[in-house]
Image (cartoon, rainbow, N blue to C red):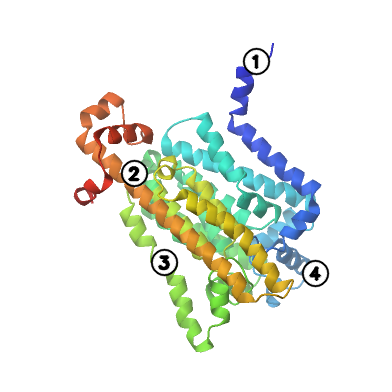
Amino acid sequence: MIDRKGIWAKLQSYRTVILFGFALRVALFLGAPSLCHTLERRPELSTPLTSIRSLKEGVYIYERGTDPYDGGVFYHSPIYLAFFTYIIPASSYFLTTLLWSLADLASSIALINIWRAKSGLTDRTRECLVSALFLFNPYTLLSCLARSTTSLDNAILLGSLHFATHGQALPATLLLALATHTSLYPLLLLPSLIMILKQNTQYQQESSTLTSVIKYISSFAALVGVNFFIADSSWIEQTWGVIINVTDLTPNVGMWWYFFTEMFDHFRTFFLGVFQLHHLIYVAPICLRLSDDPLFATLVLVGIIGTWKSYPTLGDMALWAGFLGCFPEVVANLRHPLFTLTVHLYTSILLPLLHSLWLLTGTGNANFFYAATMVYGLNASLAVVDVLGAGMRVQVKKKATAMLLQEEMKDHNVDERADIKVIDKIWDGQGWSVVQFTGSLS
């Protein structure tokens, strides 16, 4: 007799979801290589800083004894250069297929562990949902098939957050330093990462903020030494320098490339400063305002960076969307999730269409594609604002419930990490509105 309950229990395991995600990626890599090679050329999925084609070219030049950073066409970190030269050859389609598939699996497992640490619960259904939201997100899947190094950067960053939520300062800071070396902007997440560490009881007993900063600086300095061992000093200008100065104006889904194409040279330095400071100014206020929930502060910062960095891809939005799956209470309080999803669907059609009209058929111009990127960027920005507002509404609900319904909370066994459905039930039963309490609780 078939044990249906046993089969259903296995299907509800996150391991099954991960296995399906891995099998799907390998099947597409091996069964549709022409599709993968086509995706490698898409500006929505790869930039000059994350392209596998650029990486292959750099490795080829490096293997022949020439500095790949001299030509002005290679912008990857020396760490990636050495890794894909000596460990996994960039020219090996099969090995890179396994690497990118495993990177997405590692990201999924990290997200599950982050959710467990955040909620203090082990829920099969929620674990499957968190894993599936990341692995089967079209942006995640397409970035993997394009073999954009964004997928590897995301895995490194999520690994850092995983260790931070478990109070392990050394691997958390080491991986954050590595992510900073490969894509620079994760440096802005250092304050929120340390705040996450400080919330962990194990960390409070074994370490301090200063110690964590020293560990990060030491890891960063050690990686700088490794980079200098691999290549001479020209790598700085051709990696971090390109990210900061935006010297390569290849079209992408960001807001920068067209703006600086049209920019007069004598205004360029000023607006570079304005655009780069646009990331920096959010760090302090968000970390201060959300100091009681640093993991949520990290979510907001990841969304801002993924939208406004100088060379974004759809894989950056995939990271943010997957991370958002760890906050079901925030998702439940979003104002316009349907609008956000439909506009993402709209831009996913519009971006390749207008890019084709511009560069393939010649019936359009650069304004066509840039208009689509502005729609994408505006929608992503509105989504981040919506998530921030939803998170603050959740905080208000929890604080009001804790202040005004202490006895009823005890009856429902509600604590700081309670299921948001219980709090919503209490809230709705009283007929309260969030705006009634925002003034007194701020």
Residue position for label 3:
280
Q: CA distance from mark 4 to mark 1?
A: 60 Å
- In the picture of the structure, the residue carrying the numbered disc 4 is 64
Q: Earlier in the sequence, mark 3 or mark 4?
A: 4
In the picture of the structure, the residue carrying the numbered disc 1 is 3
Instruction: Tell me the crowding category of disc 3: few under 14, some 14 to 19, or many 20 or more residues within 10 angstroms, Cα based.
Output: few
Dot 1, crowdedness within 10 Å: few (<14), some or many (≥20)? Answer: few
Tag shown at residue 354: none
Q: Earlier in the sequence, mark 4 or mark 2?
A: 4
**Compared with residue 239, is residue 161 higher up or lower down, i.e. above or below?**
above
Quick one: label 1 or label 3, which is nearer the N terminus? 1
Q: Residue furthest top?
A: 1
Q: CA distance from mark 1 to mark 2?
A: 41 Å
Q: x%, y% of residue 438?
A: 24, 49
Foreground of the two, 354 or 41: 354
Residue drawn at the location 46% of the way across and 46% of the way down: 164
The earlier-in-sequence mark between 2 and 3 is 3
The earlier-in-sequence mark between 1 and 2 is 1
- How many residues crowd mark 4 within 10 Å: few (<14), some (14–19), many (20+)? few
**Residue 428 spot, x, y in % from top left:** 30, 35
Q: Residue at x 45, y 76 (%)?
A: 273
Mark 2 or mark 3, which is nearer to you? 2
Q: Kindly tell me whether residue 440 is visible in this rendering.
A: yes
Q: Look at the numbered disc 4 and give the secondary structure of its residue.
A: loop
Residue at left 56%, top 43%? 133
Are the residues tagged 3 and 4 within 8 Å (C-beta)?
no
